[in-house]
Amino acid sequence: MGYRRDTKPNLATGDELTADMVGIGLLFAFEPSPQPDIEDTLLSASIEAMDKDDLRVFGLLVAWLEQHHRGVNADRLYRGLAHIDSQRVRAFWAGVGKGLEGRRWGRFANMYRGPQLNLLAAGGEFHLLQHGEYPLFQGGPLRVPRNAVEKRKGDILSPADLASRHVVYRWRLVIGSTYRADMWAQIEMDPKTPPAELARKTRGSFATAWQVKRDYSVVEQRPH
């Protein structure tokens, strides 16, 4: 059977999600998952934050994105988000895309076309008047009080610390947040991964996986 690309995310909840969030650098007092999927964790956390009104997760998630967005495979995240129907979750990512801007993030604005929403189910107007709107979300579809995020910025690993712990993140910093980087990371963890499995694990194309395996075989021929 030929390779069929599957972009559907594997979403986590409860303790599994907490462990995954710790594994990508959100500082909960919890044992981290080993090498959790970055985009699946971000999508799962956004569901927890937006649909379950978990403001602590919301604050940590936004602080993480502001510090580490260079380490996100935006195409992979966008394809995963297409499988999520929640309008609040989509409004969140549309707001993030508008705030981060740039070619990689611009199309996230297309994920939500509804009316402007408040982050807070109650007291939103009061907090916005008291504290102002958080800069990342200004002018976007989600209205977020400034105090919902700023107190969380010290709860995130630095890029250097996260790169020392997370193989995919490190490779993305080296060669860019692409499927190719993810495949090199997978090869580092398991050099014997065949092309079809490499594509499946990273949700990339078979053609890219084949090229990466070819390049790896060339590199491995160098004198040691």
Image: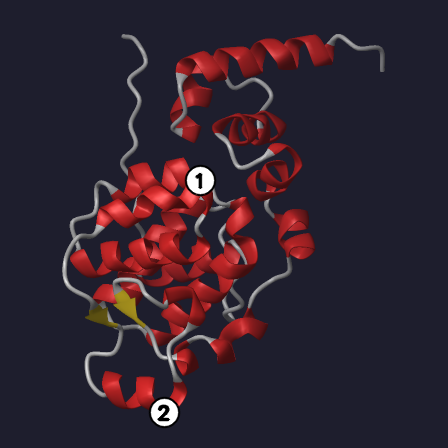
Q: Is residue 197 visible?
A: yes
Q: Is residue 46 left or right of residue 26?
A: left
Residue drawn at (53%, 37%), measured in percent from left and top?
Answer: 177
Q: Label 1 to label 2, Cα distance in Å?
A: 34 Å
Above or below, 6 against 136 in this view is above
In-front residue for pair 92/215: 92
Residue 13 falls in which quadrant of the image? bottom left
At label 2, the amino acid type is: Gln
Q: Which residue is mark 1?
A: 103
Above or below, 161 against 188 in this view is below
Q: What crowding class fits label 2: few (fewer than 14 Cα within 10 Å), some (14-19), or many (20 or more)?
A: few
Q: State the residue lying farthest toward the right.
A: 224
Residue drawn at (21%, 65%), measured in percent from left and top?
Answer: 51
Percent position (x, y) of residue 112? Answer: 21, 52
Quarter of the image that includes the N terminus: top left
Q: What crowding class fits label 1: few (fewer than 14 Cα within 10 Å), some (14-19), or many (20 or more)?
A: few
Residue drawn at (58%, 35%), measured in percent from left and top?
Answer: 176
Above or below, 176 against 46 in this view is above
Percent position (x, y) of residue 167? Answer: 60, 40
Residue 44 falls in which quadrant of the image? bottom left
Q: Is residue 9 visible?
A: no
Q: State the residue lying farthest toward the front.
A: 139
Quarter of the image that includes the C terminus: top right
Percent position (x, y) of residue 91? Answer: 25, 58
At label 1, the amino acid type is: Arg
Q: Which residue is mark 2?
A: 130
Q: Secondary structure at mark 2?
A: helix
Above or below, 28 against 77 in this view is below
Residue drawn at (17%, 53%), measured in percent from left and top?
Answer: 113
Q: Mark 1 near mark 2, Cβ–Cβ under 8 Å? A: no
> Can you tell which mark lies on residue 59?
none
